[in-house]
Image (spheres, rainbow, N blue to C red):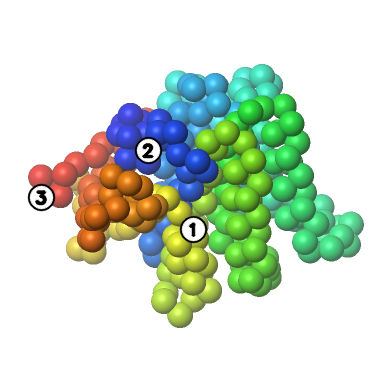
Amino acid sequence: MSDIITSCLQLQKNISTNRIVVKEINGCDGSFIVNCVISYCIKQNSPLLIVSSHNSITHYHNVGLRMNHNLFKSCEAGVIDYFDFGDATLTNIMEYAESDQLLIDVLKKIEEMQRNHDTVNIIFDGITHLLDLQYTLQEVNKFGSEIIEIAAKSKNPLVIFHCNDVMEDDANHCWANLLSHKAQTVVEVENLSSGLSSDVSGHLTIKYPGNKFNEEHIHTVDMKPKKYLYKLFDRGVKWLAPGTV
């Protein structure tokens, strides 16, 4: 399962700042994509910073044990670092600090890792929660652009933004679209329109907007997205071609 995701997300290609956006459509859970990328970075011994306003480090560790890796050991080895945005927000409120201090702290954490590693990959899990914390759309958009800009200072980094996409008149929808325009790859995870099924958890669409700038695709007018069905299990995900169930 991880190998399929690695291939679809083009993780093994030498892409300058491989920007990936994972969009959860109307509350569908797409965290399995993030967990697979974490697993990939650990197996490749590729430094990774996880910035999360969505899940705790214990959550990622427990999921990792099911995928045969130990996140805490990777943290001790300096391969993985974790920034708890929720906990930092509480501390920020208690200390009456400026609201943009959290964003500055994240950027400083990236630069700190870059001083020790040639490549630093970044995952921001739950970046749309910044809007819930009363950051404006302009502030969040600027922050996302700054993360990409700083990440580009290292060698062929991977940057993943995990976000929610809901109603079209919602700020989350606008922010998800802004992120998609910055992305090399966009992954959309959505529940079945027909309702719940015992055989399928949802469907997944992968688009490659960044490929239109590649020489091999420069004459392609309409790039077709890849579509899959998937079934979530306790220890992984099964991918299915549309129409096979």
Q: Mark 1 points at which residue?
A: 182
Q: Is mark 1 on a helix, strand or loop?
A: helix
**Is residue 7 in view?**
yes
Q: What residue type is labelled 3?
A: Gly
Q: Name the residue under label 3.
A: 243
Give residue 196's mark: none
Name the outermost residue toward the left: 244
Mark 1 against mark 3, which lies toward the viewer? Answer: 1
Question: Residue 131, position in %: x, y?
Answer: 61, 67
Q: Name the residue under label 2.
A: 10
Count the marks: how many? 3
Q: Is mark 2 on a helix, strand or loop?
A: loop
Q: What residue type is labelled 2?
A: Gln
Q: In this view, does 71 lie to the left or right of 4?
A: right
Q: Is mark 3 on a helix, strand or loop?
A: loop
| Real-space CA distance between mark 1 and mark 2, rounded to the nearest whole angstrom | 16 Å
Chain-order first, disc 1 or disc 3: 1
Q: Which amino acid does label 1 sit on?
A: Lys
Q: Which of 245 and 112 is in front in this view?
A: 112
| Real-space CA distance between mark 2 and mark 3, rounded to the nearest whole angstrom | 25 Å
- Tell me what residue is drawn at x 55 percent, y 26 percent: 46
- Tell me what residue is drawn at x 62 percent, y 25 percent: 79
- Tell me what residue is drawn at x 60 percent, y 43 percent: 152
